[in-house]
Image: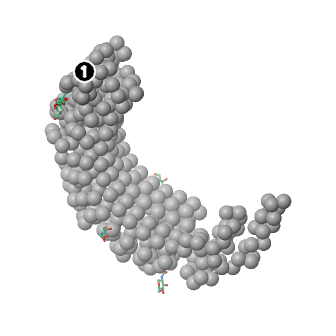
């Protein structure tokens, strides 16, 4: 009985509710969206035909996944713009000329090429915080990006080079996704990014760790490159670094000076799928160590503990050593004392 009444109400309500928030919006899906565009235009803020502008959230405009090949015109009230999963090829100046209030611009999974993004198109977006351009056909980071950005995602493009001028003055940038491009070097272009905490530059063509990385990184992801060494004292420069991932590189023992990874603060270290023959010395404070699929021939307990007693032991919880040249028998029984907290120990 109750259900029938609700159903009846839901078919009547779109006609009777002509303004205000609709408490039964959840009941009638697509119909409410068409209704929403109508309401938005009644309220004075126009909405392009190909997009949806929910009346309950007038600062958002949804144009994602509609097969668009060109940018819609963006009204000035819009702060959150969703344009992902289309086939948009260009961003002309005219499209965003009035969109100066944008805070989020989501344009991932389109077909943008660098030469078809107008030079100054983003410059006027002075409050833009998130710009998602991943999975496009860019060959460089767009020039003239607003300095207000906090989260920039340009992964899965064809970017080969990052130049200092592209990221200059981005003092608030905290997240930079550059992974799965064709970057061979970043020079010192990232050094001045004083708020950057997460840098993902995995899946590129780096042959060495970039020289100038920003100081306040918490997460550094360098997997799937061709890096063969880590400079002496490298990790000591980053006092807040907690997660370092260098899986699928060309690291050898020779390329890793002793005590490189014996730094406190590190929580997770992933060196899996490299060419290491020895277990590097790590700090007793490290919690997760991934070394699977290397060429390690010996289990050296001293890599984890230089002293073992009541208060001196390793905090490791995860240790992966599978896919190396050692077996269970190579793990000495004293290990239990040093690695007393390990819950995952795979050999
Ligand atoms: C931008 O705003 C001005 C003034 O409201 C208006 O005349 C113009 O048509 C708008 N341009 C676009 C592309 O929306
Ligand atoms: C973008 O790249 C994809 C895949 O590489 C390709 O199929 C498409 O034609 C490219 N689009 C443009 C506009 O270059
Ligand atoms: C960076 O963030 C601060 C604090 O939120 C803000 O006051 C400042 O305007 C931002 N900088 C830029 C260039 O937007
Ligand atoms: C790691 O560093 C600590 C503190 O600097 C030191 O006491 C310890 O002996 C080092 N571990 C090894 C195995 O060298
Ligand atoms: C071992 O623990 C003692 C405290 O019980 C401490 O004084 C000493 O420095 C520790 N040794 C190492 C190598 O951490």
Left or right of 72? Residue 5 is right
Secondary structure found at label 1: loop
* Residue 99 occupies quadrant: bottom left
Which residue is at 53% across, 61% downward?
Answer: 86
Quadrant assignment for ligand 4:
top left
Q: Which residue is mark 1?
A: 300
Q: Spot the residue most to the right.
A: 1
Relative to 254, say whether 41 is above or below.
below
Left or right of 226? Residue 106 is right
* Residue 247 occupies quadrant: top left
Question: How far from the left and from the top, in percent, is residue 278?
Answer: 25, 24
Left or right of 15? Residue 82 is left
Question: How far from the left and from the top, in percent, is residue 136?
Answer: 44, 57
Query: Are there few (<14), some (14-19), or many (20+) residues within 10 Å of tag 1?
Result: some
As rendered, which of 282 and 185 lies closer to the eye?
282
Which residue is at 35% across, 56% downward?
Answer: 175
- Locate the N terminus by quadrant: bottom right
């Amino acid at each position: 009985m109750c259900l029938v009444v609700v159903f009846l109400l839901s078919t009547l309500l779109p006609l009777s509710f002509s303004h205000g928030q609709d408490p039964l919006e959840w009941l009638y899906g697509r119909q409410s969206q068409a209704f929403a565009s109508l309401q938005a235009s009644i309220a004075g803020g126009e909405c392009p035909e190909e997009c949806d502008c929910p009346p309950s959230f007038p600062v958002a405009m949804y144009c994602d996944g509609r097969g668009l090949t060109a940018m819609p015109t963006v009204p000035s009230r819009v702060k959150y713009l969703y344009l992902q999963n289309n086939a948009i090829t260009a961003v002309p100046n005219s499209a965003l000329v009035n969109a100066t209030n944008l805070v989020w611009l989501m344009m991932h999974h389109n077909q943008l090429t660098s030469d078809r993004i107008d030079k100054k198109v983003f410059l006027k977006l002075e409050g833009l915080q998130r710009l998602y351009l991943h999975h496009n056909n860019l060959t460089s980071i767009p020039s003239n990006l607003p300095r207000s950005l906090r989260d920039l995602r340009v992964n899965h493009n064809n970017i080969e080079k990052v130049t200092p001028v592209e990221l200059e003055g981005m003092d608030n940038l905290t997240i930079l996704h550059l992974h799965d491009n064709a970057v061979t070097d970043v020079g010192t272009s990232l050094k001045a990014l004083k708020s950057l905490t997460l840098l993902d530059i995995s899946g590129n063509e780096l042959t060495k760790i970039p020289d100038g990385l920003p100081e306040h990184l918490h997460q550094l992801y360098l997997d799937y490159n061709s890096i063969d060494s880590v400079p002496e004292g490298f990790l000591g420069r980053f006092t807040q670094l907690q997660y370092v991932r260098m899986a699928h590189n060309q690291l050898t023992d020779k390329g890793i000076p002793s005590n490189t990874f014996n730094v406190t603060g590190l929580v997770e270290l992933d060196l899996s799928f490299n060419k290491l023959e020895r277990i590097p010395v790590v700090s007793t404070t490290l919690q997760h160590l991934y070394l699977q699929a290397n060429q390690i021939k010996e289990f050296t307990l001293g890599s984890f503990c230089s002293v073992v007693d009541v208060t001196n032991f390793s905090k490791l919880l995860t240790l992966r050593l599978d896919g190396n040249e050692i077996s269970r028998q190579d793990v000495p029984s004293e290990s239990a004392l040093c690695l007393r907290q390990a819950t995952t120990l795979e050999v």
